[in-house]
Image (tube, helix red, strand yellow):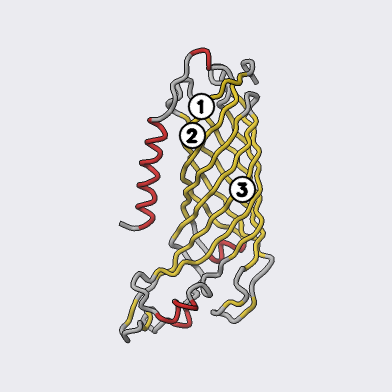
Amino acid sequence: MQPSLKLSSTFLLLALAFTLSGQKLPENQLQASTKWIAKMGMGYDKPIADLADRFGSNLNFHMGLERLSFNNWIFSTDFTYRYGSDVREDVLVNFRLPTGQFLSIDGLPSDAFLRSRGASLRFSLGKIISLHTKSPQSGIRIDVGAGLLSHYIRIQDENQAIDQIFGEYENVYDRLTRGFAITEYIGYQYLSTDGFLNFNIGFEFNQAFTSGVRSVDFTTNNTRQTGRKDFLNGFKVTWLIPFYSDEQGEQIYY
């Protein structure tokens, strides 16, 4: 099974466990309350600006923890892992045979594949604009955040048959890049009154200002690239599991 299929299957199983573990609330807890929320989900990203020259679209898996106040302010932290197979910069072009393959250590043609990988960690502040009287902490959700974003090219040679790109040279071709990122999110969040169905769904926008980490690019013999603008626009679905506290406020209406 491909790694991306394994990750997707794992996510679906964990999401089911999250859903089944939802807490059923008594009627007197239908009011807005302060709560901790664990979350996990999947999404789709479309690179733009400099990042679009390196990678095509990718999928992501994300998870995090947030604090939702009784007056609908959200303080959250999120980790996102990105993965894809559309790599547009061929870092192994200097080693390819006319057939597109590589000469392995046993003297036979061998294949290697390039994959996109990335991760981000951020802290965010958000607000729920309530649309429900029975569930006052459901409605339009808006977040802004800041953190770090990184990405690199993964060389997939399962048998490590291409000697030129492993050992002491294992990381010099990955074009590892990282930098400061800001994020905006707008979507819809729903916390059910019975605690069974809790989710948010919406659009996310990332703007990262990055630089290469490796001092030299061995493919081009250029020094590390600085001043990159690595932007991502995407769509994400997140499952939520609230842990309700004893702190409650008055019913909130907008």
Using a 10 Å C-alpha cutoff, classify the residue at mark 1 as few (fewer than 14 neighbours), some (14 to 19) or many (20 or more): some
Residue 240's mark? 2
Do callouts 1 and 2 mark residues in contact (Cβ within 8 Å)?
A: yes
- Residue at disc 2, secondary structure: strand
Q: Earlier in the sequence, mark 3 or mark 2?
A: 3
Residue sticking out furthest to the top: 28
Q: What's the residue type where badge 3 is placed?
A: Arg
In this rendering, position of residue 115 left or right of residue 65: left
Residue 65 at x, y percent in the picture: 55, 39
Q: Residues within 10 Å of mark 2 (few under 14, many from 20)?
A: many
Farthest residue in the front direction? 246
Residue drawn at the location 69% of the way across and 65% of the way down:
227
Specify whether 153 is left or right of 102: right
Circle nearer the N terminus (1, 2): 1
Indicate whether 131 appears above or below 157: above
Q: Secondary structure at mark 1?
A: strand
**Marks 3 and 2, how far apart at CA:** 18 Å
Q: Percent x, y for residue 30? A: 53, 17
The mark lying in front, picked from 3 and 1, is 3
**Alpha-carbon span between mark 1 and mark 2:** 8 Å
Q: Is residue 54 above or below residue 202?
A: below
Residue picked out by circle 1: 191
Q: Which residue is mark 3?
A: 122
For label 3, the crowd category at 10 Å Cα-Cα, with few meaning under 14, some 14 to 19 and many 20 or more, is many
- Taking the spot 33% from the left edge, 73% from the top edge, the residue there is 159
Name the N-terminal-most of marks 3 and 1.
Answer: 3
Residue type at mark 2 is Leu
Q: Is residue 98 positioned above or below 247 on the image?
A: below
Between residues 10 and 86, which one lies in front from this camera angle?
A: 10
Which amino acid, mark 1? Leu
